[in-house]
């Protein structure tokens, strides 16, 4: 906070001509960054409301041409789209619940500096950041366990993200020990201390972690793509992937590759409908993400 | 992970905090024996059981599962293979020209991604930092973080929309009198497409850690530099960049660690047989070999090779960083 207060003073004292030029250039560069970042969104929205003929003619950029809602009605009338959307919600909820439980438990254990064997427990987790079994053994494992076509194929293999684990561990370590010591003196055991003292004080941290996991599971597609055979089990990301894989006509992999040329318009509508929930919550949750990453960076 | 010590709390706090726990009995000083530790902390250990089971089954068991790289595996049979075949599959991929092609592609894409996507967040963070309007700064930052939250499927879909024959990029091409290009069908464009979409998605988010590091630089250093006659540019060069160096090194090591696993999911979405010559990488190749063609042992051998190289790269980078600049991951 001290530095934040001092910096503007430094700025004001030293506005040379060269620096003013630089600031102008900087403003231009950052404006370009903003435009480049936002343009694909604007473009896809414009295409989603346009008539196919205008898109094919290459005339849709910033604003819709031949405005219509017909394609929205068409996509929204597709039962499979909504079934897949429900799957996404269901998988996200289950997987996030599992992940937050396991991560919280382990992070709490790892945060106890007096615990014997603690560094080994940390090492077990950290090593997996740099070395993993790889795709094929994982695939064989999930298949052998009979988890195919179930939510557990998505939830269990990704239940602990080591990065999130370290962020949470750092958070628990930063909590004052006196509270827990007092609770222990009052006769609470470890479970009750965690449940009644630590977790209520960690609501913001847990909310951040829930968001981290939920966004990751919401966006994930490959586990479902790999382990789900029936289209009514797909999440909406796989629905969209099958749509675009069909559209490129070069359908590289997978079972559901239709050879049809999916209308660009339908693609655009599906993209918009998939991305809208993220865009709606983004402004409200973004700062939690930033603070979570910062904590991880400082302490991890 | 990084900037150790630079983010110390205000100087006064430790003195305030320290006296309080001092009279506590020296529990921490003595290492208890295992038996005593278990008796006292069994509840803590019990909380670790489910997570440890997770690590054992879903992280370490697959590592052991890699033995099928050296064993004959038949789908539906023993998950750890039927009998030993030695280095047969290793020899097989070493003699496979396709393997060397995807190996080269992996290196090229990895290096290009590193060269483009590692420095850009640093530059962008410095530019953000020079914005004087707080509100504008927050707006630009918020916008630049946005792509990070999108599914890779959506990124791929947007790339396809923009690059299709009727898409915006081809309209620009046409406006300059060129012929429309079907970018996604041409191997010579694949690397550009991959790296630029990667930059689009990651650069904004990548600034966060640098911005955090920037706020920790002591402003007295700027003062001193200014008194010594350093201009803006020299201040950036001699104060700002050294100030964020630990963050840079840490992120560089981490980037090198994921170097071999170049954006597998995005490539799987964006490539097609026409762009295999430049787009096919080790992970996509072993995916096709293993999951689609059922050559599990062959694919596992390639995967193991990739993982070992990845681990070696991290360890080497970490070692070099520790020797050269005194910053490392552990």
Image: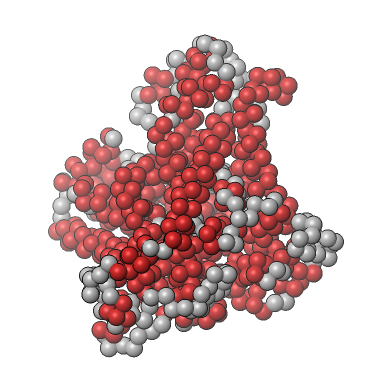
Residue in view at x 28 percent, y 38 percent = A3
Image coords of residue A293 (percent x, y) = 42, 44
Task: Out of B272 and A143, give the one closest to the viewer.
Answer: A143
Image coords of residue A218 (percent x, y) = 45, 52
Residue in view at x 64 percent, y 77 percent = B98
Image coords of residue A89 (percent x, y) = 45, 49
**Quarter occupied by residue B169:** bottom left
From the image, which quarter does the C terminus of chain B lie in?
top right
Image coords of residue B324 (percent x, y) = 53, 52
- One can see residue A243 in this view: yes
Residue in view at x 54 percent, y 15 percent = A188
Task: Out of B299 and A244, give the one closest to the viewer.
Answer: A244
Left or right for B78, reference B179: right
Whether A116 is drawn above or below A122: the answer is above
Residue in view at x 60 percent, y 55 percent = A149
Q: Which residue lies furthest to the right in this view?
A: B83
The structure's colour scheme is secondary structure
Task: State how many labels appear.
Answer: 0
Whether B30 is drawn above or below B164: the answer is above
- One can see residue B2 in this view: no
Left or right for A254, reference B80: left
**Quarter occupied by residue B202:** bottom left
């Amino acid at each position: 906070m001290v530095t934040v207060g001092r910096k503007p003073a430094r700025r004001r004292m030293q506005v040379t001509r060269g620096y003013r030029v630089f600031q102008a250039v900087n403003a231009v560069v950052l404006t370009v960054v903003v435009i480049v970042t936002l343009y694909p969104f604007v473009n896809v929205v414009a295409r989603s409301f346009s008539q196919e003929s205008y898109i094919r003619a290459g005339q849709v950029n910033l604003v819709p041409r031949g405005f219509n809602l017909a394609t929205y009605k068409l996509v929204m009338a597709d039962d499979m789209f909504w079934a897949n959307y429900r799957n996404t919600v269901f998988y996200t909820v289950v997987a996030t619940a599992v992940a937050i439980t396991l991560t919280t438990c382990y992070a709490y254990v790892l945060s106890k500096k007096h615990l014997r064997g603690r560094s080994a427990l940390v090492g077990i987790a950290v090593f997996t950041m740099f070395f993993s079994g790889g795709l094929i053994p994982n695939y064989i494992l999930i298949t052998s366990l009979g988890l195919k076509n179930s939510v557990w194929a998505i939830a269990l293999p990704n239940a602990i993200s080591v990065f999130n684990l370290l962020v949470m561990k750092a958070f628990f370590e930063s909590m004052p020990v006196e509270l827990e010591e007092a609770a222990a003196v009052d006769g609470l055991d470890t479970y009750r201390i965690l449940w009644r003292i630590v977790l209520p004080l960690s609501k913001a941290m847990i909310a951040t972690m829930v968001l981290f996991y939920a966004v990751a599971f919401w966006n994930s597609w490959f586990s479902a793509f790999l382990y789900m055979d029936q289209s009514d089990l797909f999440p909406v990301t796989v629905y969209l992937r099958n749509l675009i894989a069909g559209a490129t006509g070069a359908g590289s992999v997978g079972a559901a590759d239709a050879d049809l040329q999916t209308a660009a318009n339908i693609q655009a509508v599906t993209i918009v409908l998939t991305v809208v929930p993220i865009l709606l919550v983004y402004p409200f949750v973004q700062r939690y993400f930033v603070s979570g990453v910062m904590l991880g960076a400082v302490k991890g | 992970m990084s900037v150790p010590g630079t983010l110390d709390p205000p100087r006064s706090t430790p003195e305030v905090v320290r006296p309080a726990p001092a009279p506590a009995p020296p529990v921490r000083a003595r290492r208890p024996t295992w038996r005593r530790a278990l008796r006292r902390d069994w509840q803590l250990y019990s909380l670790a059981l489910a997570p440890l089971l997770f690590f054992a089954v879903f992280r370490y068991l697959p590592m052991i599962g890699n033995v099928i790289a050296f064993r004959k595996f038949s789908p539906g049979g023993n998950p750890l293979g039927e009998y030993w075949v030695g280095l047969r599959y290793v020899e097989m991929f070493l003699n496979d020209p396709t393997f060397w092609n995807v190996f080269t592609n992996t290196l090229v894409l990895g290096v290009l991604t590193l060269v483009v996507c590692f420095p850009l967040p640093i530059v962008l963070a410095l530019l953000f930092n020079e914005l004087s309007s707080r509100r504008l700064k927050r707006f630009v930052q918020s916008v630049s973080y946005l792509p990070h939250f999108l599914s890779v499927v959506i990124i791929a879909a947007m790339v396809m929309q923009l690059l299709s024959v009727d898409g915006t990029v081809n309209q620009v091409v046409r406006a300059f009198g060129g012929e429309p290009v079907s970018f996604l069908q041409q191997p010579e464009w694949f690397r550009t497409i991959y790296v630029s979409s990667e930059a689009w998605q990651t650069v904004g988010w990548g600034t966060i850690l640098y911005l955090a590091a920037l706020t920790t630089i002591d402003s007295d250093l700027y003062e001193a530099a200014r008194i010594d006659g350093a201009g803006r540019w020299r201040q950036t060069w001699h104060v700002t960049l050294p100030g964020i160096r630990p963050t840079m090194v840490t992120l560089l090591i981490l980037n090198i660690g994921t170097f071999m696993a170049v954006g597998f999911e995005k490539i799987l979405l964006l490539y097609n047989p026409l762009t295999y010559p430049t787009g096919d990488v080790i992970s996509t190749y072993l995916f096709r070999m293993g999951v689609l063609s059922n050559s599990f042992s062959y694919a596992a051998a390639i995967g193991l090779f990739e993982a070992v190289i990845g681990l070696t790269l991290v360890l080497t980078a970490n070692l070099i960083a520790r020797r050269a600049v005194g910053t490392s991951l552990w």
